Every structure is written in C-alpha cells, then in structure tokens.
Image (cartoon, rainbow, N blue to C red):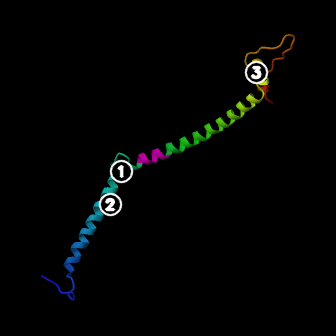
Amino acid sequence: MERSSGEKRSSGDFSIVRKLAYGFLALALLNTLANLFFSELNLKKVVQLKLASDRLSKLIEVEKGKNLRLTALHARVNRNPRFYKEKFVREYLLMFKKGERVIPLPRELWYR
C-alpha cells in the first residue's frame, strides 16, 4: 500500500496514534500518582521533612543569637579580665574581701 505524496492518510492511522498517546499519558499519570502516595519518599514524608527543616532553621537562628551574645561576652572578658574574674568570685563563689560588708538581696532585685 504505497501512497503517493498527494494521498491523505486514513483516519485509522490517526486513531491508533491518538490511542497510543492517551495510553502513554494514562500510564505516566498513574506512575506519578503511585509515586506521590506509595513510594519511599511520598508526599507525607516530603511535608514532614519540610516542617522539620523549618523547625531546624528556627533553632539555628536561636543558636546564632546565643553565639553572638557569647562572642560579645568573650570579647568583653578578654578586654577586662580582672573585672570579670572579681565579678565571678563575688557572685558565684560568694567570696568577699576582708572587712567588706555584704548585704544579701533577693535574686529578683539583682539586675533591676
């Protein structure tokens, strides 16, 4: 069945191509849906990973803030080590110089 360049294709040829295209599309859609819900990395796990990632990002920001404060404190201690040594001895070890009078205050009033 040779066709010359002027002959038209029969409508049967187009219907087979169309059926193959629709079949391929249906299989692709079915594969996509199966992977979304039943694969190892399904949609639920992706959402859980996203939420965990967001929580970790917030924790990282908190830790960066703590690190910034501690770095600033470290710089202050390095600039004036004698003052901070005395402060540590007085506040945490509760040691005082001879002849010094100490008036104990409740902790709530320490940093007002």
Q: Is residue 57 above or below residue 93?
A: below
Q: Amino acid at mark 3?
A: Lys
Query: How many neighbours does mark 2 have within 10 angstroms: few (below 14), some (14-19), or many (20 or more)?
Result: few
Q: Quarter holding the N terminus? A: bottom left
Disc nearest the viewer among 2 and 3: 3
Answer above or below: position of 1 versus 81: below
Q: Amino acid at mark 2?
A: Leu
- Residue that carries the numbered disc 3 in the rendered image: 85
> Disc 2 versus disc 3: distance between alpha carbons?
70 Å
Marks 1/3: CA distance? 61 Å
What label sits on residue 37 in the rendered view?
1
Quadrant of the drawing holding the C terminus: top right
Q: Disc 2 designates what residue? A: 29
**Mark 1 crowd level (few <14, some 14–19, many ≥20, 10 Å Cα):** few
Q: Inspect the image, locate mark 1, and give the three-letter code of the amino acid beneath it.
A: Phe
Q: CA distance from mark 2 to mark 1?
A: 13 Å
Marks 1 and 3, the one that precedes in the sequence: 1
Viewer-nearest residue: 104 or 62: 62
Q: x%, y% of residue 58?
A: 58, 42
The answer to whether 27 appears left or right of 105 in the picture is left
Q: Secondary structure at mark 3?
A: helix
Task: In this rendered view, identify the residue nearer to me: 106 or 110.
Answer: 110
Residue 74 location (% of width, % of height): 70, 30
Left or right, 54 with reference to 2: right
Secondary structure at badge 1 equals helix
Indicate which disc, 2 or 3, sits on the residue closer to the N terminus: 2
Secondary structure predominantly adopted by residues drawn in magenta: helix
**Which of the two discs, 2 and 1, labels the residue nearer the N terminus?**
2
Q: Position of residue 86 (x, y in %)?
A: 78, 20
Q: Name the outermost residue toward the left.
A: 1
Q: Which residue is painted at 16% across and 84% down in the image? A: 3
Magenta highlight range: 44-50
